[in-house]
Image: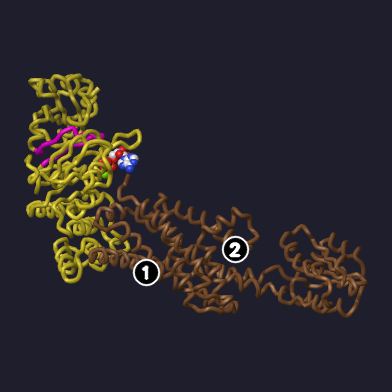
Chain colours: A brown, B yellow
Amino acid sequence: MRGGLLRLAAVMVKEVRQLSRDRLTFGMVLGMPLMQMLLFGYAINMDVRDLKTAVANQSGSMLSQRFLSDVRQTQVADIIITTDSPQSLENLLRRGEISVGIHIPSDFDRRLTDPNRPAAHLLIDGTDPTITAVANQLTSLVPDAPSGLTATRHIEVRPYFNPEQRSAVNIVPGLLGTILTMTMMLFTAVAIVRERERGNLELLINTPVSTPELMVGKVVPYILIGLAQVALIVALGQLLFEVPFAGTIGNLYLGAVVFITANLSLGLLISTVARTQFQAMQMTFFVMLPSILLSGFMFPFEGMPAFAQFLGECLPNTHFIRIARGVMLRGADVADLAGELRSLGLIALVALGLAMARFSRRLD
Amino acid sequence: MSSPEQTAIRATGLSKQFGQLRAVSDLSLEVPRASIYGFLGPNGSGKSTTIRMLCGLLEPTSGEAHVLGLPVAGNASRLKARIGYMTQKFSLYGDLSVRENLSFIASIYGLAGRRARERINELQRRYDLVEQQTQLAGTMSGGQRQRLALAAAVLHQPELLLLDEPTSAVDPRSRRDFWACLFELAQAGTTILVSTHYMDEAERCHYLAILDRGVKVADGDPEELKRETGMHVVEVLGGLVGELQETLSDASDVFSVTQLGISLRVLLPTRCGEPEARVRALIDPVDRGARVRLVDPSLEDVFVSATRSPSR
Ligand SMILES: Nc1ncnc2c1ncn2[C@@H]1O[C@H](COP(=O)(O)OP(=O)(O)O)[C@@H](O)[C@H]1O
Ligand SMILES: [Mg+2]
């Protein structure tokens, strides 16, 4: 037992020493979160904005004016032309001078309370899907208005029309999980392959060091690094995007420890399958892509087909994003997170178990 | 040399198949304790594969090996503490210093605190690494790295050392020093199995096995091997070396002809009675000026006679 602890400590000390001398990896630990946050932060601010817009307001009522001023405030549409008829809007669109045309019929006020007729028309340049998507945000408001609501209530659209804030708030917890997935998995995915490539493994497996000692010794130092990354990302999120933090940092760290362990274990599993460091990286990206697409980071989880949801449930990132959003945005406590923590723990155990079982103490 | 206490390694019929390739075939050997046993063979002859089977890194396709009295199959982990293995490629950590590498190995073998420190100091002194102790292993010369690897392999005072081409990246002077260390270890009772493709190193071994394409073609102590080549060796010193070589190679009773600088070494099976006269007769039509004399077989001749099929 004492020998086991000594060997475990020896592997950890060795890993830390090597890591402290590996400037590339070290740079990745700090650089990756910084770069991703700035990159995504920039992308968040670059959410399609200032679409060139023309308005044909045939009503001219108070309500229509206020509606237009709200549209302007969203910054999604930049009203550059005012014209008088839907036909001229069509012409402008066709010539590519505008991307969005807003037609407000003369009976706008009356239509607002009429469930059967749209209050206004939105003409959009359908060739660019990003424009379509953003302009759809505008559309969905007007025709979706339930009957019986007053007009003022109807135009009260501010929270919806605040993509800047809304996406940052949702993206930072997602980004936290995604960055950790990327760095943590990559660290351990190349860890054993690298020792194999450099020939260290042939010596190691000929010593009394056991497989669990080797695996755990490689995982533990990276857990600490991962936790440091969590602190960095959360701090950047607050500093750059004023992301709120409703819950307690302790709960986030609890989730992060289990999540990081799951990712490191998956990395180790990759490391026992891959033959070269390059293969290990390829396999990591193979897991990375669904971790971005199917985890609810990019697209709402509920909107995905059942099979994609099932795949998503198998990925640590999916569970951690729920935990991070829960803690950071809703102030969720441990009881709320228990299910997700269990799933993460299960993934970690299965991956680590498989990695140990697959790790061969022979060369053939 | 047959009782288990006196035999460090006994292998019978060891074979290893890699797909279509038979890397080692039906190899048997017996290595006495406290001796230096050499594996001599060109690259690809199966030296590393055999060593790996002996320490349990590779599973033999057939045959079995007993190491330090235990069958390797099923005892690999028990044997690890009693075997020191120096891989062909440097396998310590290039990004750790000499001392860090040694303390890592010390902890792995259960040595901690003062005992570890003392053992490491002792090894650094013995293997002339004191000045390099804070240097990263990756930045050291070939000779220094070999000494470090040997220090790491003997740190836990193993009964058996398996050294796979330990001197292939080392200058002649370091090689000599390295062999001095090996003799010292053998003197102290360690059994050493060392692979090499250098004749002069093979010459120093107590016992030798010559491997060729996975087959053991000869074994014994170097002197005995030289005595029992079954060949006469005739040296031809003369002018038209190229033409002489051609003529001699064409003769059906000449086993092989090798050029060494300005001389030729001709091997003739011992069944030809008068080797000098026979060679004289062959070369006279080409060059009467060449001198001919009978010499003692060298290990190189042993190697050639054991590995080469008779000349065409
Ligand atoms: N893991 C392996 N897979 C396939 N072939 C191998 C493997 N290891 C060695 N070989 C082949 O077996 C033969 C013997 O190799 P090796 O034992 O390394 O020779 P040596 O150490 O004498 O140079 C070579 O032809 C080599 O290519
Ligand atoms: Mg070899």
Tell me how far mark 1 sits from mark 2, CA to CA: 35 Å
Q: Which mark is residue A296?
A: 2
Chain identifier of the residue bearing label 1 in the image: A
The residue sitting at the front extreme is: A335
Is A270 positioned to the left or the right of B230 in the image? right
Q: Earlier in the sequence, mark 1 or mark 2?
A: 1
> In the rendered image, which residue does mark 1 sit on?
A20
| Element carrying mark 1 | helix
- Which percent across, then down, holds residue B43? 27, 40
**Residue located 13% across and 24% down the image:** B269
In the figure, A59 relative to B277: above or below?
Answer: below
In the figure, A204 relative to A243: above or below?
Answer: above
- Which percent across, then down, holds residue A261? 43, 64
In the figure, B138 relative to A335: above or below?
Answer: above
Residue type of the residue flagged with mark 1: Ser
Q: Is residue B116 magenta?
A: no
- Which percent across, then down, holds residue A196? 35, 53
Q: How many marks?
A: 2
